Structure formats: C-alpha cells, structure tokens
Amino acid sequence: MTTEESLRPQSLMLTFLGEQVLGRDVCVYSGSVIDVFARAGIGEQATRSTLTRMVNRGLLRRQREGRRMYFGLTDRSTAVLRDGERRIWHTGAVNRQWDGTWTLLGFSLPESWQRQRHDLRSQLTWSGFGPLFNGLWIAPGQIDVTELVAELGLSAHVKVFRAHADTGTDIGAMIEETWELSELAARYEAFVERWQPWETQVPGADDALTLRLRLQAEWLRLIRRDPRLPVRHLPEDWPADRAEKTFRAVHERLTPLAQEAAERLLDLVPVRDDQA
C-alpha cells in the first residue's frame, strides 16, 4: 500500500509498542520486531538503528535473556504512548465540546534569537496553536503551555491568557486566516481514500498486523497535526468525522487477524526490575 508520505521508523516503533507492549509489563524480542518491520518494508539495519536511538533517548530499555535482547518501555515512552492513546480513543478528531475559550500566547524575542523563535513556533504548532498576528498565537480551549515554554527557557519572554471572542468577531474567518484548513482537509480526504477499501477487504493475518500498524501510525500523525478547531466554525463538509469513522471501522476489522498474527510471531517476556 502506498502512503501519502513515508512514516518515520520511530513513529512505527512507538505505534508497535503501544499495540503490543503498553500496559502488559512485557518486553519484546528484537528479532520479533525486525521480522514485523521487514513485513512493513523496513530493513533490518534501519530497525536496529531505531531501537538503539530510542534506547539512547530514554524511550526504550534493554533486557537480556540468555543470548537474546528484549526491549521494553520506559516511563518516558509510556507517557508518550498514553498521550497517543488518549488522542486516538478519547479526545477524537472532531471538537464538539468547545466552550468558547481560546488560549492566547504572546511572545517578544530579540531579533538575534532565530533558533529560539523557530523552536517556539514549531512547538506551538505541534500544540494546536496558529499565528493570529506576528507575536500572538491562538489555540482553541485551555492549553497548558507552562512546561513547553519552560523547556525552551523562554518563560520570561512569553505571556499567556484565556479569552473569549467579542460578539462581533467572525470566528470562521479568523480560523481560515490563521490555519491551513485546505491542507488539513486534503490530508483527511487522502486518509479516507487510502484506507476505505479495507473496510470490506480481508487481508491475511500477517498482512493485517502490518496494515494495522501503519493505519494507527498514520492516523495518530494526522490527528496530532490537527489543532481540533471547533467543528461549528469549520466548513460543513469538514472530512475529519468521515476519516475517523474509516479509521475505527478498519481498525476493528483488522484487529482480530492482527492479534492472531502477533500471538504467533512475537516473543514476549515479563519485565524484570533488575535490568534498566
């Protein structure tokens, strides 16, 4: 299956761990990971490099059993995966519960701070903010950016407010000016086009395992790019709801076969507290 753009091996790895390891107190054999990722079109060297980098970044722990090396989650990767789980299954792609609150973030940085400005804008975009004006960014709902700003060392240069729009404000027009709605809508449409055929097709069990892996990784990447703007201020034909229904239908269809393949292909062992 072709994808709109290639998924990073680390994104697939986190999705794989979320499906097979999260909440189970187990570690997975490196050979099992290599086998599954080969079926997903990722070579052994790329998989091994990804495992090593994730260990070095504190996202995985190693556990040796005889001559075999197993990998398990750390507190950091568990937090990342729980957040992804929440975004997929609880928060959802469509914001119907917006209470009218906006988070406004203003910043003023010295002209020479190009890198800091770039890093702040990147993190704000990731957190659902859009640029209302040059130094004033806005996001729907109450967004806590305290940790984000502190990690960048910019607490003294940032001011955050909660606000409601004045009665005369055209919120729909403001949203269109602030966020790239057409690009986001196109991503949702492409997702539906790519995955809807699997609502009726039945793959083999091994294929179902890698298909579900890619399905969930793609969906999480897509909804993480979505600022979850209030649906009542979006175009009537906004495709997020349709895309979410496709995701859930295909995920439900693939899961029994994927679980069957996982039980057959994966070598798992209990976590031991004596190894970090």
Image: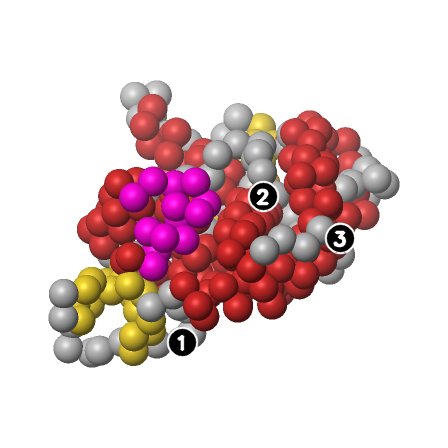
Residue named by callout 2:
222
Q: Position of residue 166 (x, y in %)?
A: 76, 43
In the rendered image, which residue does mark 1 sit on? 24
Amino acid at the residue labelled 3? Thr
Question: What type of secondary structure mainly makes up the magenta span?
Answer: helix
Kindly identify the amino acid type of the residue bearing the numbered disc 2: Leu
Segment colored magenta: 32-44
Mark 2 is surrounded, within 10 Å at the Cα level, by few (under 14), some (14 to 19) or many (20 or more) other residues, namely some
Circle 1 sits in a helix, a strand or a loop, which is it?
loop
Residue 235 versus residue 47 in the image, above or below:
above
What residue is drawn where x is 55% and y is 45%? 218
Between disc 1 and disc 3, whose residue precedes?
1
Q: Residue 200, labelled with which disc?
A: 3
Cα separation, mark 1 vs mark 3, equals 31 Å
State if disc 3 and disc 1 touch (CB < 8 Å). no
Residue plotted at (39% across, 29% down): 118
Above or below: residue 86 compared with residue 190: below
The answer to whether the residues at label 2 and label 3 have Cβ atoms under 8 Å apart is no
Give residue 81's quadrant in the image.
bottom left
- Residue 10, image x, y percentages: 37, 46
Q: Which is closer to the viewer, label 1 or label 3?
A: 3
Q: Position of residue 241 (x, y in %)?
A: 76, 50
Element carrying mark 2: helix
**Residue density around tag 1, few if under 14, some if 14–19, many if 20 or more, within 10 Å:** few
